[in-house]
Every structure is written in C-alpha cells, then in structure tokens.
Amino acid sequence: MGSSVAPKVKICCIGSIEEARLAIRHGASALGLVSEMPSGPGVIPEESIAEIASSIPPFVTSVLLTSKRDAASIL
C-alpha cells in the first residue's frame, strides 16, 4: 500500500529570489510567479519575474500565472 513516490508541491506568489530559494530549500518542485492579473494578491513587476525565473534551477518548474491571452505580449 505504501508509495515511494514523493508528492510534487508548487508554491505560488513567489515575490523575490530569496522566497524562491526558501521554497526550493523546503522541497518545492514548482514555483508560481504571478504577473498581470485583474485582481488578487501576488502581482509582481515583469522585471522581477524575469530575475526570479532566471535564478530557478532546472530541476524546479517555474509557472507564470497571467491574465494576458496573446503570446506576443507574454513573451
């Protein structure tokens, strides 16, 4: 009955490189970065998202949460 597969955990609303490192150190397998949204907490500047995303190691998935719908405006 026991499973040897560890659960994967995504931590959302990461707002700094320090928060990203803390989440990874405590076992996060994915980090959510919140961009332009119509409402809700966690929105951070695009420049900060780029800096944080570039600091995330390859073994951790980064996820961008945005309300934008056009790929060109996201990239």
Image: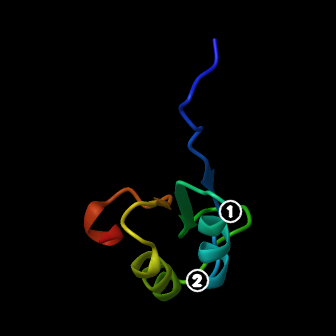
Q: Judge left or right: residue 1 versus residue 54.
A: right
Q: Judge left or right: residue 70 versus residue 8.
A: left
The quarter holding residue 56 reads bottom left
| Quarter that holds the C terminus | bottom left
The quarter holding residue 57 reads bottom left
What x and y, as percent, mark residue 3?
58, 23
Q: Judge left or right: residue 6 versus residue 49.
A: right
Q: Residue at x 69, y 62 (%)?
A: 39
Q: Residue furthest right?
A: 41
Q: Residue at x 40, y 60 (%)?
A: 59
- Tell me if mark 1 has few (under 14), some (14-19) or many (20+) residues whose alpha carbon lies within 10 angstroms of its own: few
What x and y, as percent, mark residue 12?
64, 59
| Quarter that holds the N terminus | top right
| Comparing labels 1 and 2, the label whose residue is closer to the camera | 1
Q: Which mark is residue 73?
A: none
Q: Which mark is residue 17?
A: 2
Q: Residue at x 59, y 66 (%)?
A: 24
User: Is there CB contact under 8 Å for labels 1 and 2?
Assistant: no
What x and y, as percent, mark residue 62?
45, 62
What x and y, as percent, mark residue 15?
64, 77
| Residue underneath mark 1 | 26
Amino acid on which disc 1 is placed:
His
The answer to which of marks 1 and 2 sits earlier in the sequence is 2
Amino acid on which disc 2 is placed:
Ile
